[in-house]
Amino acid sequence: MKPITLRETTPDAALQLLGLLQQEARFVDFIEEDIQSFSDAEIGAAARIVHEGCHKVLHNHFQIEPVHKQPENSRVTVQAGFDPSSIRLSGNIVGKPPFKGTLVHRGWKITDTRLPKLSENHNVSVVASAEVEL
């Protein structure tokens, strides 16, 4: 069996994405808010705004497609040599592929990424600037 090689990643792209989600959807504000005192209707109204902003960021900066084209709950066959990062088997896994089962979730894959370029001195760890009104 071929040994697995791990590669180093930098947090810059993840921080940039988090900044975009904050800018368009106030995502960090929403997640960091203590929602215990809000009604379900208030949370739902806020979630609608966050959802719309997140959808905008996702579709402006990524091309996203389902891993499996078949509709959920359809019968599928998983062939030998499948990519385990694309297909996760669950249930009673016995024997060797091909496996036949029900597609529970189609999965998602990113086929193109279009993140904005950053200036060298941009601090990506600041996902939302503090605002001071004068």
Image (cartoon, helix red, strand yellow):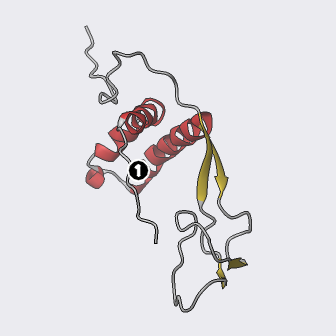
Question: Is 11 rendered above or below residue 82?
Answer: above
| Residue at image point 36% right, 43% down | 30
Where is residue 130? Give x, y as percent: 26, 22
Give me the residue at 52% from left, 37% from top.
Answer: 53
Determine which quarter of the picture holds residue 120: top left
Residue, x 46% and y 51% (percent of image)?
Answer: 44
Q: Position of residue 68 (x, y in %)?
A: 68, 64
Q: Amino acid at mark 1?
A: Ile
Q: In the structure shown, which secondary structural element does the residue marked by tag 1 occupy?
A: helix
Residue name at image x 70 percent, y 79 percent: 77
Residue 72, image x, y percentages: 67, 71
Seen from the viewer's position, the closer of residues 5 and 65 is: 5
Q: Is residue 107 above or below residue 110?
A: below
Q: Nearer the viewer, residue 37 or 128?
A: 128
107 horizontally vs 30: left or right: right
Mark 1, residue position: 43
| Residue 104 found in image quarter | bottom right
Which part of the image, by quadrant, shows the C terminus?
Answer: top left
